[in-house]
Image (cartoon, grey):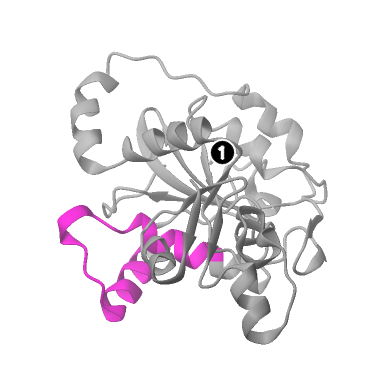
Amino acid sequence: MGNCVAGGAYLPVLCDKILMTEGSGLYLAGPSLVKAAIGQVVEQEELGGAKMHSEISGTVDFYEKTDESCLKRLRSLVALLPEAQSAADSKINRKVFKTAKNPDTAYDLVSLDGQKNYDARDLIAAVVDSNSVDEYKADYGKTLVTAYTRIAGRPVGIVASQRLQVRTKKEGIQMGGVIYSDSADKAARFVMDCNQVGGRRRFVWRRQLRALWQSLRSAIHRGVADCALRGDGRGPGFGHSFFNSRARSRTWR
């Protein structure tokens, strides 16, 4: 919330989560210094504004319009931490959880032949708890939808293939269902982030790669086009990967 310049700009980028409000700046040198140093005239937003970092560089995880929405998002993310979740676990069994959309709408979204386009967010809304979605890098890597959310009160991370054609400022038009380089980068960072656990965190690439591989092995992988509505008695399967955001080695079924 506000400007973060020079050496101070390194600090938020080293954090696990970056929230940035509209009108804020994040850069190593401001427009005046850039002009003095290399003669280039550039606006603050183009140089290191919130929209640029959320849509082009992919640096920002959550773009917020106001300080109030930024603080609200921060509270929601803190509530996903293991310490906060342990206090909430005892209350889960006494609650009735509802989805934002009727779960049966999944059958309307996904066609039998798998050719119908749909917004992955609508399918997620039919599966997860209402008002529990914090979408990660929503404006970057748009052919994948990544989100922290809850199912029956339990925190999970979701990686979903977007089946709509999208447009990005950096790459232009991208086809739904295709994993482009920006989407792959977003997904990899998201999965590794879901595996970070408090004081047990280790910033070693070998451990991060191992955690990523374990997550991919324990995730649910089902292709919507192949089995979402098949009549083989095995029930509906959603073509999305559900990751346990508390980094436990279990899957959601």
In the displayed structure image, the side of residue 147 where residue 230 appears, left or right: right
Check residue 89 for magenta coloring: no
In the displayed structure image, the side of residue 248 where residue 176 appears, left or right: right
Q: Amino acid at mark 1?
A: Gly
What is the x, y in percent for residue 122? 67, 35
Q: Residue at x 37, y 71 (%)?
A: 213
What is the x, y in percent for residue 147? 51, 46
**Quarter of the figure with the C terminus:** top left
Residue furthest out toward the left: 199
Q: Nearer the viewer, residue 235 or 59?
A: 59
Whether 191 is drawn above or below 73: the answer is below
Residue 168 picture quarter: bottom right
What is the x, y in percent for residue 193? 38, 59
Q: Residue at x 58, y 39 (%)?
A: 236
Q: Main secondary structure of the magenta part?
A: helix
Whether 66 is drawn above or below 145: the answer is above
Check residue 196 for magenta coloring: yes
Q: Nearer the viewer, residue 154 or 78?
A: 78
Q: Residue at x 15, y 57 (%)?
A: 199
Can residue 141 be seen in this snapshot?
no
Q: Residue at x 65, y 67 (%)?
A: 47
Region in magenta: 186-215
Q: Which residue is mark 1?
A: 233
Residue 32 picture quarter: bottom right
SS class, disc 1 = loop
What is the x, y in percent for residue 87? 19, 28
